[in-house]
Image (tube, grey):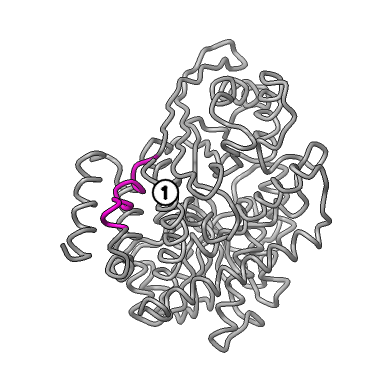
Amino acid sequence: MTSKEVINKVMEEVKKRDPNEPEFHQAVFEVFETLKPVIEKHPEFVEAKILNRMVEPERQVIFRVPWVDDQGRVHVNRGYRVHFNSAIGPYKGGLRFHPSVNLGIIKFLGFEQTFKNSLTGLPIGGGKGGSDFDPKGKSEQEIMRFCQSFMTELYRYVGADVDVPAGDIGVGGREVGYMYGQYKKITTLYEGVFTGKGLTYGGSLGRTQATGYGLLYFLNEMLKENGQNLDGKTVLVSGSGNVAVYAAEKARQLGAKVVAMSDSNGYVFDPEGIKLDTVKQIKEVERKRIKTYVEHHPAAQYHEGSKGIWSLKCDIALPCATQNEIDGEAAGKLVGNGVLAVAEGANMPSTPEAIKVFQDNKILFGPAKAANAGGVATSALEMSQNSMRCSWTFEEVDAKLKNIMVSIYRRVSGAAGEYGCAGDLAAGANIAGFLKVADAMMAQGVV
């Protein structure tokens, strides 16, 4: 069979086996579509069924999470943990608490995580998990009770050398603390089983900033290699969570002006530049919606509908909110308004149609699995510190993060050139990430 026929056959099997998981199908197709030159060069991967094995998680755990609210009412949510691939190290990936969470979403994230972790060059495999629980509107006590119930089941499947979760959407330092406390109580183990922990109990300096900062380090290298820089550039950042806030912060440090940020309800546009202290106060302290920004800065404008942010004129677009937030139409508006580069801070925020628009118009494009790998890279650095019972300074961690992101860019760009798609970083990221995992799987036999 030709490489195209091999890939199409695997995709047919994926859709037949898991028919109601469109995000997972999208992620698999987006990766495999770029692997044709790899399959042609390495027929041994076909013989060993590497593609077929790579789309099937090593383990999927689904469990009930009962908890009691402040009024004494019982609620039941569903928990997930998908151990996707451990060929190059223990499972590593975040936990997401959001009403949209289902098995297909977790599998898509775990599949992407496998290649992202591979690109870091660090010994970590791919996993993901979460729940359809929504922390918004819940009291501290309700969130604590939910996290404890969640961990009462999950503790069986995680461990410092088995699976090391972190945070994701809806899971920050507060939630990690509650889950880690429950894990420690049940197991009596004080080990680095979580990353994103508080600094008083094993967390790493720089972890909070890592994904956003790493995104900008990758973007800066991409721009530099193409004769550009961030100085004086106008930037749009979707989202207003951890990734978005620190991407905006680093963009400003590198000389750019961030003029818009968003949440799931809408976006704010501040032509004078977004005031990050206000955004941090709103989101990290008050936990309010982004529309309250205009109460502090009346010259700014708030618009309902988060997708509208991509209709604004900019030089750089940083989607840092959620999957599929930029479609073909939004990408066309960005191109029409003169965007120079797009770098993905969220997981799979651009649809295949959007990516095609960017590539057809020669827009510099940094794909998520490479550009937003800074978070998991720094999580791996936290694991190292926990294992050594030591703590590095912020400057040490940040320097290591920058080196990792620059190395990822060069690894991705090099793979694209080697396999006949020079300049296509999306293909390069898929190829480079895939090859390391595939080689490890080949070395370990059929397991």
Q: Is residue 425 left or right of residue 119?
A: left
Point out residue 138 in the picture as x, y percentages from the top left corner. Answer: 60, 28
Q: Nearer the viewer, residue 230 or 387?
A: 387
In this rendering, would 61 be left or right of 125? left
Residue farthest bottom in this picture = 227
Q: Is residue 301 above or below residue 72?
A: below
Image quadrant where residue 285 sits:
top right
- Which is nearer the eye, 268 or 428? 428
Q: Quadrant of the C terminus?
A: top left
Q: Residue placed at 69% from the left, 56% from the top?
A: 209
Q: From the top left corner, tell me how far across and down residue 72 is, in percent.
A: 58, 10
Circle 1 sits in a helix, a strand or a loop, which is it? helix
Numbered range of the magenta stretch = 45-57
Give the number of callouts. 1
Residue 399 lies, in percent from the top left, at: 75, 66
- What is the crowding at mark 1: few (fewer than 14 residues within 10 Å), some, or many (at least 20)? many
* Residue type for callout 1: Phe
Residue 168 lies, with reference to residue 63, above or below; the image says below
Classify residue 431 as left or right of residue 125.
Answer: left
Q: Residue at x 62, y 59 (%)?
A: 374
Asked where in the image residue 2 lies, by quadrant, the reply is: bottom left
Instruction: Say which residue label 1 marks.
Output: 111
User: Could you say which is closer to the camera, residue 347 or residue 56?
Assistant: 56
For residue 29: magenta?
no
The N terminus is located in which quarter?
bottom left
Q: Residue at x 44, y 29 (%)?
A: 61
